[in-house]
Image (cartoon, helix red, strand yellow):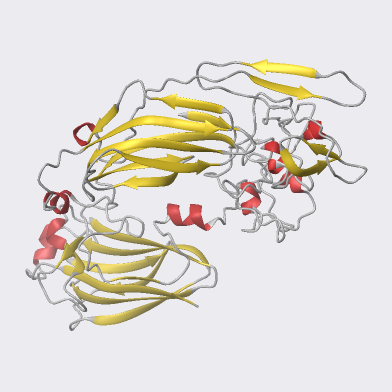
Amino acid sequence: WEVYIGPSGGVISFAAYASLYAPRDVCEFSIDGVPQVIIATFSDDWETHQVAVGAGKHELKWKLIKNFAGLNKAIIDDVDVPSGYQGYVKIDGIKLEDNSVTHVVDEEVMVAAVGEAANTMPTTTVATTTTSKPITTTITTTTTKATTTSTTTTAEPTTTVAPTIAFVECPSDLFSVEGLPGCCVEDPSYLGDGACDPRAPYNTEECAFDLGDCCHETCNSDSAYGCKTKEGGEYGPFGFFCLDPRFGKMDEKKCQVENLEWIGDGGCDTAGGYNTPECGWDGGDCCEDTCDSEYAFYPCGANQAYVCMDPSVVNKETKSDSPFSFQDGFESGVFDPLHWDVDDGDAEWKIDDSKPAAEGNYYISARTGDISLDFGTAKLKHGIQSFGGGVLSFDIQALVQIPFDDLIIMIDDDVVAEFSSATTGWERQELDIPTGPHLVQWIHRKNPSNMLEADLKLFGYPDEGVTMIDNIAFQPS
């Protein structure tokens, strides 16, 4: 459900009745993709939930999520559910209060059942009925007559609010803005015009961050400049120096650059302090995943190449979610998908407890017998993002023998260690990790020289090769 909230914000409320049980299933209510309410247990009766909503445009979403933790099927099947569990949630009485305007959705009870849910985070479609009162905005100055504009909608209402001058206490050379207490600007018409005025006094909390102009999520596409000016046009670039804490990653005090209009304009500015966390990594311009071609003035990546340093993007690409210390002894019995990629090979690494672990009960293993093809592999991948480098350590027991099998360890494209014969028990190994994003791979290989079977027979018939790894840890410098 897409809603538009006035400068004073509002409250969304709804009632829920659930027959759910985590980790099998949960119901998630989110605003703009950020979870606000999680319903994970049985309901004794209808329960009302209330969440504050800030000013601007928002997307409200209710999701029924099956297996929200991404556990393997065997673990989910072993979960003992309480008597009466049915796996559904009912939502009713949705109400949005925005000053004097109220939207109510209560004509029917919406039901989502787990049996209808996909395996990975499906979205429950919500039928809504929306009504809105006409919005009247009055603009009054000392030199022009009052202008009244009314807008009425019956579905997904879009309200363009023209700022009005109100004579309250402001410096003599500035005007106050009705509905925005404390907002004093030279020209109120600049607020909400679809072009970001990135500096104070416009881009401030008191002025609703240029009345939404400086963030994609709040910029009104029906405004004068429409938020999406392009190269070759008559105006721009304006950029998106988004300081609204709900959407932006900027630090206004630390992002001290010469041209704030370059932030979020589609061109990656590598010099001058733009591509930094304080400036939101140039407003997303420097990573392909975050440069928004819809709002970019210049074509993303066309004239100024991407130099992606945003850890949230780099870590996503390398299956890592933290530049800080990390440790996994696999005692949960499952691979954490945020850290590990085990699918990119001819066979998978597995959680194992058939032999004594280096520490605890579990370790991970790759076996030659699981690799069907000669010259095939089982790959274990882990991404590391380190701003100052560090040391990656792990316990290993490699029961391999060239030419039948071996284990190599790679950092990015370089082989940094190789095991071609059996180790005597568990050994602790360490790898130096340079600064920046890196991909570490443990690769168990079958017949790595791709020898003919007849030639392999000359070396006899060894026991099945297996590599075992435990207690992997990264300690940054």
Task: Give the image quarter of residue 463.
Answer: bottom left
Quarter of the image where the N terminus is located: top left
Question: Is residue 258 among what the camera can see?
Answer: yes
Q: Is residue 448 visible?
A: no
Q: Position of residue 53 (x, y in %)?
A: 53, 40
Residue placed at 35% from the left, 20% from the top? 107
Q: Quadrant of residue 351?
A: bottom left
Residue 327 position in % (x across, y down) = 34, 71
Where 187 falls versus 132 (above or below)? below
User: Above or below — where is 346 with respect to 5?
Assistant: below
26 over 109 or under it: above or below: below
Left or right, 37 with respect to 395, comes to right
Q: Residue at x 53, y 69 (%)?
A: 435
Q: Which sits in the foreground, 21 or 416?
A: 21
Find residue 222 and report its image quarter: top right
> Relative to the observer, which residue lies in front, 373 or 3?
3
- Image coordinates of residue 399 in percent, x first then y, are 17, 74
Residue shown at the point (72%, 17%) measured from the top left: 149
Counting every numbered tag in the picture gives 0
Image spot of residue 400 (x, y percent): 18, 72
Q: Is 198 on the left-hand or right-hand side of 413?
A: right
Q: Is residue 220 left or right of residue 371?
A: right
